[in-house]
Image (spheres, grey):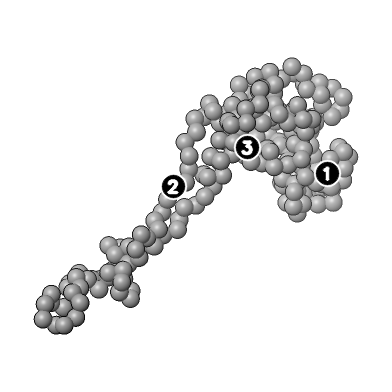
Amino acid sequence: MELQMANGGTLEVADGVFAREYKKGLVHQAVVAYMAAQRSGTKAQKNRSAVSGGGIKPWRQKGTGRARAGTIRSPIWRGGGVNFAASNRDYSQKMNKKQYRAAISTIVSELVRQERLLIVDVFEISEPKTKAMVAKLSELGLSNDTLIVTVEDDRNIALSARNLISCEAVTVTMLNPVNLIAHDKVVMTSDAVKAIQEWLV
C-alpha cells in the first residue's frame, strides 16, 4: 500500500505493518504488559525471620507468671516482624515478541485508518527552543498533543519538545504501545517508517 506524505508525495509500505486488522484484545494485552513492566515492585517489609535479634527465648517457659514467649521478634512485640510482610515483587507479564510486534503493527495501522499518522521527509528544529517546536507543529497543521518519531536521537527536537506537556519526541527504538496511543497525532520521518517496517515485518 501507499501512504500519503505531508509534502504531497507517497511512500510505499507493507500491508502487514500499516494495513493490519485491528485487534482490541491484543492491543489491550500489550498496553497492560508494558505498563506492568514499568512498576518497580520494590515495596518491602521485614517479617519475623528478617528482623535482627530474637535468637534466645526471653524467659523460661513456666513459673514466671507471664505469657510464654519464644522470641522477642514476634509480630506482637514492639520491634518485632510484620505479619504478612510485603516483599519485592515482579509485576512483569509474559508477552511473546511476535505478539508484541503484532500489537504495535495493529496500533500503527489504526493510526493510518484514523488519519492520525503524518509522514514527513525530515523533521528538524534549527535551535532548541520551545517556540520553534510550536511553530514547526503549527506549520504542519498539528497541535501540541503530538508524538514525534525519528530514527536517531536529535538533541534540538528533544529539548524543544520537553517543555510542552503533551508533546513527546522519541526514536524508533523507544516506541511502545502506550506512547503510540496516548497522543492525538503521530509524526514520523520517512526513515523512521522504513525502520519500523524492518522491525515489524
For the residue pair 77 and 187, the one nearer the viewer reads as 77
Residue displayed at 77% across by 45% down:
145
For the residue pair 199 and 43, the one nearer the viewer reads as 43
Q: Dots 2 and 3: beta carbons under 8 Å?
A: no
Q: Quadrant of residue 52?
A: bottom left
**Residue position for label 1:** 143
Residue displayed at 40% across by 58% down:
86
176 with respect to 186 (left or right): left
Name the mark on residue 177.
3
Q: Quadrant of residue 108?
A: top right
Relative to residue 189, is residue 48 depicted above or below? below
* Label 1 secondary element: loop
* Label 2 secondary element: loop
Name the mark on residue 90.
2
Say few, some or many: other residues with alpha carbon within 10 Å of mark 3 (under 14 / 14 to 19 / 20 or more): many
Residue displayed at 79% across by 30% down:
115
Tag 1: amino acid: Ser
For the residue pair 191 and 100, the one nearer the viewer reads as 100
